[in-house]
Amino acid sequence: MSIGHALLGLLEGGPRHGYDLKRAYDERFGHDRPLHYGQVYSTLSRLLKNGLVSEAGVEAGDGPERKRYAITDAGVTDVERWLGTPEKPEPYLQNTLYAKVVLALLSGRSATEVLDTQRAAHLTTMRELTRRKADGDLADQLICDFALFHLEADLRWLELTAARLDKLAEEMAR
Amino acid sequence: MTSLLTAEGLYKSFGKTNALDGAGISIREGEVVAIMGPSGSGKSTLLHCLAGILPPDSGTVTYRGRDLTGMNDGARSELRRTEFGFVFQFGQLVPELTCLENVALPLRLSGMKRRDAERASKEWMARLEVDTVADQRPGETSGGQGQRVAVARALVTSPKVVFADEPTGALDSLNGERVMHLLTTAARETGAAVVLVTHEPRVAAYSDREVVVRDGRSRDVEFVR
């Protein structure tokens, strides 16, 4: 998640100060991982240095930082470019899981056990997400669904591999 | 929690194929259990044996201390009608009856008066959000609505166990999720256990735990943190 781009996107709705931005970010994207103030201010100062935001006056108040920031034209272009560029589709787990299966087979351990343990962990996470979905609003549901479909893809791979273990063991023994 | 429904050492073959090869499972009161496994692994056969639809070649199925395998057909059907509810992938509603009559059917078969049966059915249809199609025939409803009518019919008798075999198999994701959400919520509210056969992990995620069937043998898979 690019925090800089997320903050820029939030600023497109109008100038905000740092605390306000953090709150907006946490509310929309920070369910599991709220931003630290330090992250917000260091990101803002980087955006300022790169000309993607500008200072837009100081708000009267008691807080430590009441400086308001506005997105610049360069900032808007940057958000547009970010939205238009696809994320790298990363096969993040397969390598590790594949290695575990192969090593289990090579060492005469139960590869089924490895796969079932992983599968149970995946399903536990999927259950938690499903419960969270039931209690959440549409935004929660969409975020959880994204994770659920990805975990489901992993699980399908685990199942397929479990069904092909004998063949894999045969090929490795050759 | 005590076991409500238990199967031990089940064997069942169809011709030369061993569908079940020593499978066992234990269902506790009020829990939602997903039976998973690849096609042809024996998961549906296990469900059919558990529900008393199919007699195993050997092994026992015990429901609240009563041995299903030893019962005669009449006693078994009686048990299925009064204690169990069923939801299948499709083809379970009577096409000539309205949706309301379909939901009321199990109550009518148990001898309940039409008015009482329809009143209870309407409540269930409202809970499953299909009260709007009460007077339509199943063929006039969407797939998702039809499945929710089937769930209402499965729950109308206040069963202790609901058997659901790929209940979302013919539905798109959104309708499938809706059926699962309503089914599991209603079951949890009424304390019914659900035995859910599915090959879809996202559907299984509505369960409390899962049992995996491979080559006719079952295995409890629980994640210990």
Image: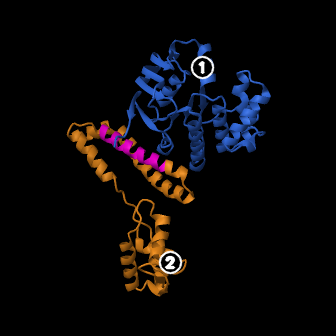
Location of residue B221 in the rendering, given as x and y in whole percent from the top left corner: 38, 36
Location of residue A100 in the rendering, given as x and y in whole percent from the top left corner: 27, 46
Q: Amino acid under label 1? A: Leu
Above or below: residue A55 compared with residue A141: below
- The chain letter corresponding to orange is A
Q: Residue A5 appears in which quarter of the rendering?
A: bottom left
Q: Is residue B129 visible?
A: yes
Q: Is residue A126 magenta?
A: yes
Q: Is B157 situated left or right of A130 in this image? A: right
- The chain letter corresponding to blue is B
Which chain does the numbered disc 1 sit on? B
Foreground: B192 or B169? B192
Q: Which mark is residue A11?
A: 2
Cα separation between marks 1 and 2: 64 Å
Image mark count: 2
Q: Tell me the quadrant of the picture where the C terminus of chain A can be found.
A: top left
Q: Badge 1: how crowded within 10 Å, few (<14), some, or many (20+)?
A: some
Write the start and end of the magenta stretch as one range: A113-130
For the point 48% across and 29% down, which residue is it? B28
Which residue carries the number 1 mark? B79
Q: Residue A14 appears in which quarter of the rendering?
A: bottom right
Above or below: residue B63 compared with residue B120: above
